Image (cartoon, rainbow, N blue to C red):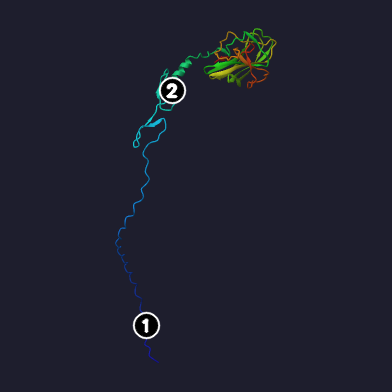
Amino acid sequence: MGRITVSSNNLFPGPKGEKGDAGAAGTNGTNGTNGATGATGATGATGATGSSGVVTVNAPITNAGTSTAANLSVSAGTTSAAGILQLTDSTSSTSTTTAATPNAVKTAYDFSNSMVLPFVTGYYYKGTTANLGNTTAATANTTYYVPFFVPTTTTFDRILTRAGSGFSGTASVRLGIYNSSAGKPSTVLLDAGTVSVTAAGVSYTITISQQLTPGLYFLAANSQTAATTNTYTAIGSNQGSVYNGQPYTTNLTMIQYYSQASVTGAFSTATSLTDGVLSGAIVAFVRAA
């Protein structure tokens, strides 16, 4: 058998040495040089030709310029073509190429109002200038509509009817005001209720508060309960009407009122109207407040 030699260093090793520091990082290498520039590409196609610069306009604008420089203007207005107009304050001009200012319109409006005879506070007004006679004999349950024109906005505080000198007995008379359509009574504006008429030569009044704007109306009256002698005052000493536009029939007889038969109870829309050209209508009066 061979000899084995054992070193004490192998049987009993010494302590391990400390770890060495990490090595320093290496640096990046330098960039290489740029390559040579490529050749220039081919020229693109030519674009479409632009507009000539001419401005297209419509009346009343006009263009007196050229294809390179516009020269726009607006035509003057006339009665047959649109355009610009000179303003004027004149209320007497006959020009057809100028326009009235609000001031001119207001001047004309104020003047027209000054020419209108206003209703006088406290006076009674009836609906027609036609003379129906001193007293008229009414038919029971017939509504009589008498035209009443209002030129200026007015409030009325009374509506009445007046028994004629020949009246006798007792009657219930309904009074009211109607709107107009096509010159005839149409819808109810005011149903003032009824008055009980009991004596000849006496006025019977209902208190109201009714404003009427300018226009045509109809004062309505209906003797819903007939008296023994059913007559009412048509023309008296009260203030007269301002209505001057009653229509005429084909034979030139003035239409003094319209009537509707078989009306009982409250007023409703006027229908089945008959022209009244003779005496016989109950006339209602209203008082200006």
Q: Quadrant of residue 218?
A: top right
Which element type, helix, strand or loop, lies under badge 2? Answer: helix
Which element type, helix, strand or loop, lies under badge 1? Answer: helix
* Residue 260 position in % (x across, y down): 65, 18
- Residue at the image position 45 percent from the left and 18 percent from the top: 108
Q: Amino acid at mark 2?
A: Pro
Q: Quadrant of residue 136?
A: top right
Q: Quadrant of residue 140?
A: top right
Please identify the quadrant where the N terminus is shown.
bottom left
Kindly identify which numbered label has been placed on residue 93.
Answer: none
Q: Earlier in the sequence, mark 2 or mark 1?
A: 1
Residue at numbered disc 1: 10
- Residue at the image position 43 percent from the left and 23 percent from the top: 102
Residue at numbered disc 2: 102
* Residue 50 position in % (x across, y down): 37, 42
* Residue 51 position in % (x across, y down): 37, 41
Tell me how far mark 2 sits from mark 1, CA to CA: 128 Å
Q: Amino acid at mark 1?
A: Asn
